[in-house]
Amino acid sequence: MVSKKMQSALNQQIKHELYSAYLYLSMASHFEASNLPGFGHWMKKQYEEETGHAMKIYGYVNSRGGRVELEAIEKPPAKFKSPLEVMKQVLEHEKIVTGTIHTLYDLAMKENDYATQVMLQWFITEQVEEEKTAADIIEQLKMVGDAPAGLIMLDRALAARS
């Protein structure tokens, strides 16, 4: 059974994951309105991934005899700047999420909650991938600079994400 303290922390992480999904959906809307459908598609895939992360924790809490209590999710920003600035925001956000996962892992270690440690290992590995992907796109955007053709090519590449 999951402890009350761990249950509360996991419930907070569900909120973080759902906020991430909400943020990425807002970014998708921005890109679609900016005629960058590939970036929009990529962000909608991020939305789906973050929702999946929340549901993974949701299922885990329930499987350990805990109770999921959903918290209010704050409104994400709706206005964004250039694709490069948006992707920098994505990377910074992912670093924050990485920090919350590490804090959860620390708590699981303090509580000798080995099952939660194992479950969180998947998230730790996932966050390494999330940060690398955002950083790679940032570097590509820096290479493209102000060249519209390069931005269009990158937009098409991001549209191919399955």
Image (spheres, grey):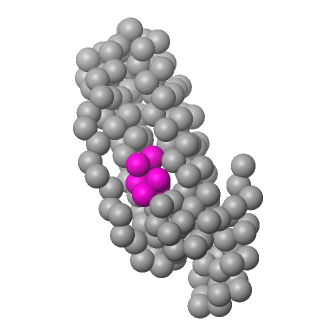
Q: Write the residue at 43% across / 24% down.
A: 58
Residue stretch rendered in magenta on the structure: 20-26
Image quadrant assignment for residue 8? top left
Q: Write the residue at 45% across / 47% down.
A: 21
Q: Nearer the viewer, residue 161 or 17?
A: 161
Question: Measured from the top left, where is residue 113 in percent x and y?
Answer: 41, 19
Question: Measured from the top left, where is residue 80 in percent x and y?
Answer: 40, 72
Q: Write the residue at 53% across / 35% down.
A: 52
Q: Is residue 25 magenta?
A: yes
Q: Is residue 33 magenta?
A: no
Question: Measured from the top left, where is residue 9 in percent x and y?
Answer: 30, 30
Question: Measured from the top left, where is residue 59 in percent x and y?
Answer: 48, 20
Q: Write the residue at 35% across / 13% down.
A: 66
Q: Is residue 95 visible?
A: no
Image quadrant assignment for residue 15? top left
Describe residue 62's horizontal placement relative to residue 84 as left or right: left
